[in-house]
Image (spheres, rainbow, N blue to C red):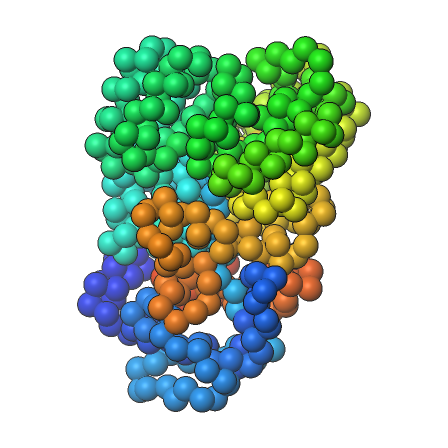
Amino acid sequence: MTVNLAYLLCRTLFLACLLGGVQVSAEVLIDNVNIVPVRSDEGARTARAVLVRDGLIQRIAAAGEISAGESTTVIDGSGQYLMPGLIEMHAHIPVAKQGDDQLVRDTLFLFVSQGVTTIRGMIGDPYHLRLRNDVNREQLMAPRIITSSPSLNGRTVRTEKSAIRLVKLYKQKGYDFLKIHPGISLPVMEALVKTAREQGMAFSGHVPADVGIKRALAYGYGTIDHLDGFVTGIADGDVNAKQGGFFGMRYAGKANRDKLAELVSAAAASGVAVVPTQTLFTRWAGTESAEELASNVEMRYMPRSTIKQWRKRKQQLEDDPLFSMSQSRRLLELRNDVLIALANAGVPILLGSDAPQVFNVPGFSALHELEAMVDAGMSNTAVLAAATIHPATYLATLAGQDQPQYGRIEPGQVADLLLLRSNPGDDISNIRSLQGVMLRGQWINSEHIERKLSEIAGRNR
Ligand SMILES: [Zn+2]
């Protein structure tokens, strides 16, 4: 019997089984563990016992205070750290081709392997609706999926009529929200937003050039992704966002600080959350060469054809007349300033890395993104919030719930947990010291993760 099939059986029958490193059991006790705060107002909780039953955190007590039943799996957390699973808010999920879903399964496992327990897919497809249901029914060892509609952009929505039709269609099909890409004209966007509001459908993503960031904030975007809307929105002089180049690079040296302050207050007042995708920028436009990036260990988990395509895309950017390394550096500094200004104003900043895109490998790129946020000047705790409680709160609102169901370590929460050897509150890179992942109550240890990763590498050799 394959591990997948056995996993499915154990889960459906609530059996306690150990399947090559995956503990499928109704009750797990993690004893004597330190709980990592993910909010500045949350105190450290040391030497705790955390009891998980039927996928939920049942009880938290002092170490040794909860006694294990006969069928309880006990994990010794001594000297280790427990935090909520990571929530990746800008992911791309592949689509199975001719019934072959190996790449899809591998991609989903890559997320899990690095501690990502929820993903928001940013280019939806009917296939993802089925995938989301499979995960919800626990038929797949994969992060929880929230999926956007297919892309709404200048090519897919050219008229007001088509905007109205597509918004209604995507709502009816059951997508969680609408994905906005560049190129949508202002009248079409107005029709789209009006219909989305009527239908109670959230919309998120890029800010089309004709719309501009100020209008986007007034429209009530759920999340604004990538920061380029802010870069062009605060530039002085004649600005043509359509001609701004990669992430608004043309305007990197034109930022007006007064405009930034004004825009940041507007963002804070609008209730928007921001997904900066710093690692997409730094890997695509940063100083590391394609050669260096392609030799990163994690690249072994991607198909060779993908790496080839990533090299090409990086080269294309470097060949762009608007691109120079000094301009790229200037833009990164500006992006960091914008990010910190938004965070300081209380705008929720959310983890999102845009994997798999240009040397960002699913899961691994989330860790780069957390480090990039720290490099920008955010505190470790603020970054941990951006990876857990902030996106969980956002997604709860999206789902019409008043409280997040995951993203915190509290009784009643879904047990999406990471066990770490070292404290990421001391150094964000300690997020890499993963000992195991609890995915909706199922414990996956590091041996199982390593074995699955080498299988994936083997398929891509
Ligand atoms: Zn994207």
Q: To which quarter of the image does residue 99 belong?
A: top left
Vertical arrangement, residue 213 with respect to residue 404, above or below: above
Mark count: 0
Q: Determine if residue 143 is in view.
A: yes
Residue pictured at 44% horizontal, 47% vertical: 394
Residue pictured at 54% horizontal, 46% vertical: 348
Most foreground residue, 11 or 133 = 133
Q: Residue 127: x percent and y percent? A: 28, 35
Residue pictured at 32% horizontal, 30% vertical: 197
Most foreground residue, 327 or 389 = 389
Image-based side of 157 in relation to 172, left or right: right
- Quadrant holding the N terminus: bottom left
Most foreground residue, 190 or 426 = 190
Vertical arrangement, residue 219 with respect to residue 37, above or below: above
Vertical arrangement, residue 196 with respect to residue 32, above or below: above
Q: To which quarter of the image does residue 131 belong?
A: top left
Image-based side of 210 in relation to 371, left or right: left
Q: Residue 447: x percent and y percent? A: 49, 65
Image-based side of 369 in relation to 451, left or right: right
Image-based side of 118 in relation to 282, left or right: left
Vertical arrangement, residue 18 with respect to residue 3, above or below: below
Q: Residue 82: x percent and y percent? A: 53, 69
Residue located farthest toward the right when viewing the structure as drawn: 326
Q: Residue 277: x percent and y percent? A: 58, 37
Q: Determine if residue 449 is in view.
A: no
Residue pictured at 74% horizontal, 34% vertical: 333
